[in-house]
Image: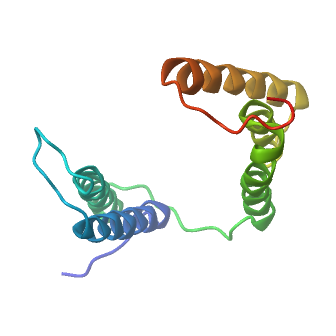
Amino acid sequence: MRLTVRNQPDFWAGALFIGVGLAFGLGARHYPMGQASRMGAGYFPALLGLCLALLGLALAVQACRPAAPRASVRRPDWRVAGIVLGAVCLFAALLPVLGVLPSVFILVFVGSMAGHDFDWRVAALVGLGMMAFVWLVFIQGLGLVFPAGVLG
């Protein structure tokens, strides 16, 4: 019996999930596991890695089923990848200077430029929404302290 990959994007996404899951699972071996009632530092990464690998296996198997829709892998859009990577690098560079909230806004706004239907008004609204989300969840809810920057 010959294995035929009908949906290449799903198959390769599944393979990536399996690889990342196994890497996390293997990396967690160097930390104490503990038990479910008293988790060690390696427990969560190992469990998360296992779940990710199983999800990847299910996705790869589904991509090989006869009922899977045929799809092939397209050429990567390097412009989009560059904009997203650049937005993350810009966030990392601006975080200590501007603080978390303006940096999150800039991350979202610049990252939105990677979309093929970029609208600066929508990007600004989403950026403001993400600023509110970060402030509510991470600063108010969890009490995390971020670099204040010049805009604090």
Task: Farthest residue to the right: give it.
Answer: 120
99 to the left or right of 43? right
Kindly indicate the quadrant of the structure image that contains residue 28: bottom left
Kindly indicate the quadrant of the structure image that contains residue 126: top right
Q: Is residue 148 above or below residue 141?
A: below
Q: Position of residue 107 (x, y in %)?
A: 76, 42
Frontmost residue, 128 versus 65: 128
Q: Residue at x 44, y 68 (%)?
A: 12
Q: Is residue 55 above or below residue 124?
A: below
120 to the left or right of 61? right
Q: Position of residue 136 (x, y in %)?
A: 59, 18
Q: Is residue 132 above or below residue 72?
A: above
Q: Position of residue 120 (x, y in %)?
A: 89, 31
Q: Residue at x 30, y 55 (%)?
A: 45
Can you say which quadrant of the picture contains the N terminus? bottom left
Total marks in image? 0
Q: Residue at x 74, y 64 (%)?
A: 77
In this picture the colour scheme is: rainbow
Q: Is residue 130 above or below residue 71?
A: above
Q: Residue at x 18, y 45 (%)?
A: 39
100 to the left or right of 21? right
Can you say which quadrant of the picture contains the C terminus? top right
Instruction: Note whether residue 95 is visible.
Output: yes
Frontmost residue, 22 versus 136: 136
Kindly indicate the quadrant of the structure image that contains residue 67: bottom left
Task: Farthest residue to the bottom: give it.
Answer: 2
Frontmost residue, 93 versus 120: 93
